[in-house]
Image (cartoon, rainbow, N blue to C red):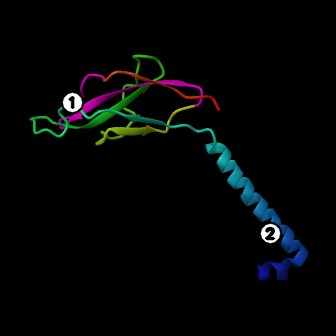
Amino acid sequence: MPAIREMLGSKTARILILVLLFCSILQILACHRETRGSHTVTLTWNESASAGKREADPVIGYNVYRGTKSQVYGPEPINALPIEGTKFVDTGVESGKTYYYVVKTVTSRKVESVLSNETVVIIPPN
């Protein structure tokens, strides 16, 4: 900061530094405001009875489907690749909405099972 003081004088340099600090604080607060009140949904389920068994077409993972109406889900899973474990965190939910989830097993040949039981999650409003 000595170079700034020499260029602008000590009083002006202090004001500039205060303005820069204030702008940085505003950016931090704006970032915090964007994330405050955001929600996630953590889903867990029991492992498929055939997962990990040596079969002709073994289960290799799970796909999660989400909808905003009961028994109506998107055509594609919300996970990019089959989930190897039995836990998934959905970060794409909005405050004040209700979501319906189901899980399907996926085999090594990319064949999906029937739907699991439906789970309902209500996201509280901010």
Q: Nearer the viewer, residue 75 or 86?
A: 86
- Residue 62 locus on image (x, y percent): 29, 35
Depth order, front residue of 46/110? 46
On the image, the x and y values in percent for residue 55 come to: 10, 36
> Which residue matches tag 2?
17
The secondary element bearing badge 2 is classed as helix
Front residue of 74/38: it is 38
Q: Amino acid at mark 2?
A: Ile
Q: Is residue 104 left or right of residue 38?
A: left
Residue 53, quarter of picture:
top left
- Magenta region: which residues? 95-115
* Residue type at numbered disc 1: Val
Q: Is residue 71 above or below residue 31?
A: above
Real-space CA distance between mark 1 and mark 2, rounded to the nearest whole angstrom: 61 Å
The 10 Å Cα crowd at callout 1, few under 14, some 14 to 19, many 20 or more, is few
What residue is at 77 percent from the left and 64 percent from the top?
20
- Expressed as whole percent of the image width and height from the top left, the position of residue 72 reads 41, 18
Which residue sits at x=86%, y=68%?
15
The disc, 1 or 2, on the residue closer to the chain's N-terminal end is 2
Q: Which residue is mark 1?
A: 111
**Farthest residue in the front direction?**
46
Which image quadrant: the C terminus?
Answer: top right
Mark 1, secondary structure of its residue? loop
- In magenta segment, residue 38: no
- Residue drawn at (78%, 59%) of the image: 22
Marker count (numbered): 2
- Image height check: is 120 above or below 91? above
Are there few (<14), some (14-19), or many (20+) residues within 10 Å of tag 2? some
